[in-house]
């Protein structure tokens, strides 16, 4: 069977930890979209792993697959694999030959396009990893795929077609001074080396065939979403989004497994008990003005600084219309609710239960981001809960959580119509209250 893990909000909900937790029962963990814009944290017994491309199952020694829906920067992939090897892990990572490759010019263009957009407030505050420009080239049918790195003639043809276009864009439109990032020969040499290493290490696969064969052989597969539903290019707060589809439908397209296979499994939404956001765009429940001190407190307690960029994250109350939207768009069969410990000790905890828009109360997100920005949150107030010992509570089980915390969990369940299968009470593997393992059917 498959279990798909999807971010329900704006990324950084703690997906890495949930993949690690339930990944014990998986044989393979596959990413199906995004690239090294992701930063997934796994904390085990005091060791912290920050993973950008290598699927989070690597910490438990599970085979990782980067599906065809991913964009792969071979440089950062190999750096990450080497760094994990230095720490004593032995990551077994397979890469789809159909996945697209991030080249150095994609990163250069990502930065320069963001800068150009910033004059009109249209910059998304990207991670600068070249994600958008790579997906653009994929859709424009001028991308370079992992399989192309394995064949010198094909790689040269692809580069000779696309690189002069990029150089012209950089020089003539943006007035840049193109260097090696725009040089066909230099790129050919460097990327052929990556191709050789992919071949030597037996990493290249047809992801769909590979995963289907593993499932046919009785193995269980976890699909690890990156980013989150409100960063989805279709279902998110466009244009302040990433350039792929983190939502569960893409777990099929981006892995090569059929939608019926994904649909027969479980889809677990990961929810942070409040809201955090790196990057720009509106945020109706953001804690600003008089609430800035509270935002600083939550930011410090929750360590809300970007895993990839180190930027301080913006902080807000839980946005429940956003979660209703996510539950429908992904078809959640369960939710993992993280970071309840971060809110512990507050006298009161609020949620944005609905929005006030043009004098009316609405319970889901409006489809345009401008209208979303016009929404005033309708806040509901919960009693706060005291600090508690996370490991002891995780050990004892759900009933050991303070009563007010359980009320909060049950409110979320009631609003979304699905069970909270796990409650995160700290970053560590042992700091999660497990109520149901989605692999147990
Ligand atoms: P991801 O991108 O969704 O995998 O999340 P990140 O790793 O970017 O950010 C989540 C951060 O919160 C990481 O530092 C995690 O170790 C941490 N974390 C995850 N779950 C919890 C939790 O329940 N409580 C606390 N305090 N931290 C958590
Ligand atoms: P994980 O998987 C939080 C945000 C960026 C920016 C927008 C577009 O760790 O949850 P991109 O570089 O993708 O073109 O940036 O998306 N963003 C994330 N925010 N967590 C992430 O990943 C993110 N990946 C991208 O800040 O607003
Ligand atoms: Mg992250």
Image (spheres, helix red, strand yellow):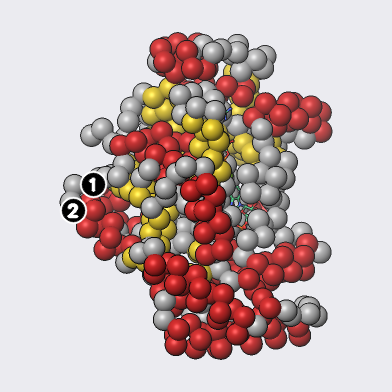
Element under label 1?
loop
Element under label 2?
helix
| Residue 6 shows up from this direction | no
Instruction: Tell me if 164 is positioned left or right of 258 in this view.
Output: right
Q: Residues within 10 Å of mark 2 (few under 14, many from 20)?
A: few
Residue at horizontal 63%, vertical 61%? 129
Q: Position of residue 80 (x, y in %)?
A: 53, 53
Q: Quadrant of the N terminus?
A: top left
Q: Quadrant of the C terminus?
A: top left
- Observer-nearest residue: 384 or 55? 55
The tag on residue 219 is 1
Check the image and report above or below for 34 versus 191: above
Q: Position of residue 7 (x, y in %)?
A: 49, 44
On the image, which quarter does residue 27 sit in?
top left
Residue at horizontal 40%, vertical 55%? 93
Residue at horizontal 50%, vertical 77%? 192
On the image, which quarter does residue 116 sit in?
bottom right
Residue at horizontal 41%, vertical 12%? 396
Instruction: Tell me if 371 is positioned left or right of 94 in this view.
Output: right
- Observer-nearest residue: 362 or 309? 309
- Observer-nearest residue: 112 or 120? 112
Check the image and report above or below for 165 versus 209: below
Instruction: Tell me if 117 is positioned left or right of 140 in this view.
Output: right
Q: Which residue is mark 2?
A: 216
Q: Position of residue 341 (x, y in %)?
A: 57, 22
Mark 2 → mark 1, Cα distance in angstroms: 7 Å
Instruction: Tell me if 325 is positioned left or right of 312 in this view.
Output: left
């Amino acid at each position: 069977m498959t279990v798909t893990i999807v971010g329900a909000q704006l990324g950084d909900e703690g997906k890495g930890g949930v993949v690690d937790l339930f990944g014990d029962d998986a044989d393979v963990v596959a990413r199906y979209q995004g690239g090294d814009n992701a930063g997934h944290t796994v904390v085990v017994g005091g060791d912290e792993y920050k993973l950008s491309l290598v699927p989070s199952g690597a910490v438990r020694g599970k085979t990782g697959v980067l599906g065809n829906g991913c964009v792969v920067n071979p440089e950062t992939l190999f750096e990450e694999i080497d760094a994990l090897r230095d720490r004593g892990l032995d990551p077994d990572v397979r890469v789809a030959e159909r996945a697209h490759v991030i080249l150095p010019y994609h990163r250069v263009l990502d930065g320069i396009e963001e800068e150009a957009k910033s004059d009109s407030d249209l910059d998304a505050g990207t991670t600068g990893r070249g994600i958008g420009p790579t997906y653009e080239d994929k859709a424009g049918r001028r991308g370079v795929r992992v399989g192309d790195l394995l064949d010198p003639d094909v790689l040269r043809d692809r580069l000779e077609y696309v690189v002069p276009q990029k150089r012209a864009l950089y020089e003539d439109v943006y007035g840049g001074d193109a260097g090696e990032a725009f040089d066909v020969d230099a790129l050919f040499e460097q990327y052929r080396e990556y191709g050789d290493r992919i071949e030597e290490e037996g990493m290249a696969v047809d992801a769909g065939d590979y995963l289907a064969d593993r499932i046919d052989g009785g193995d269980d597969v976890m699909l690890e979403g990156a980013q989150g539903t409100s960063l989805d290019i279709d279902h998110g707060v466009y244009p302040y989004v990433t350039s792929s589809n983190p939502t569960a439908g893409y777990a099929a397209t981006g892995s090569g497994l059929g939608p019926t296979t994904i649909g027969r499994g479980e889809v677990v939404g990961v929810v942070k008990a409040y809201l955090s956001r790196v990057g720009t765009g509106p945020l109706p429940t953001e804690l600003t003005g008089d609430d800035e001190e509270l935002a600083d407190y939550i930011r410090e307690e929750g360590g809300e600084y970007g895993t990839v960029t180190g930027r301080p994250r913006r902080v807000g109350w839980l946005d429940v219309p956003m979660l209703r939207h996510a539950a429908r768009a992904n078809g959640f069969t369960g939710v993992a609710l993280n970071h309840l410990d971060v809110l512990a000790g507050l006298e009161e905890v609020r949620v944005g239960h609905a929005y006030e828009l043009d004098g009316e109360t609405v319970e889901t997100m409006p489809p345009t981001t401008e209208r979303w920005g016009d929404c005033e949150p309708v806040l509901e107030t919960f009693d706060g809960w005291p600090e508690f010992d996370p490991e002891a509570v995780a050990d004892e089980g759900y009933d050991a959580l303070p009563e007010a915390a359980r009320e909060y969990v049950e409110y979320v369940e009631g609003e979304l119509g699905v069970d909270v299968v796990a409650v995160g009470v700290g970053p560590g593997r042992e700091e999660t209250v497990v109520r149901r393992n989605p692999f147990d059917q």
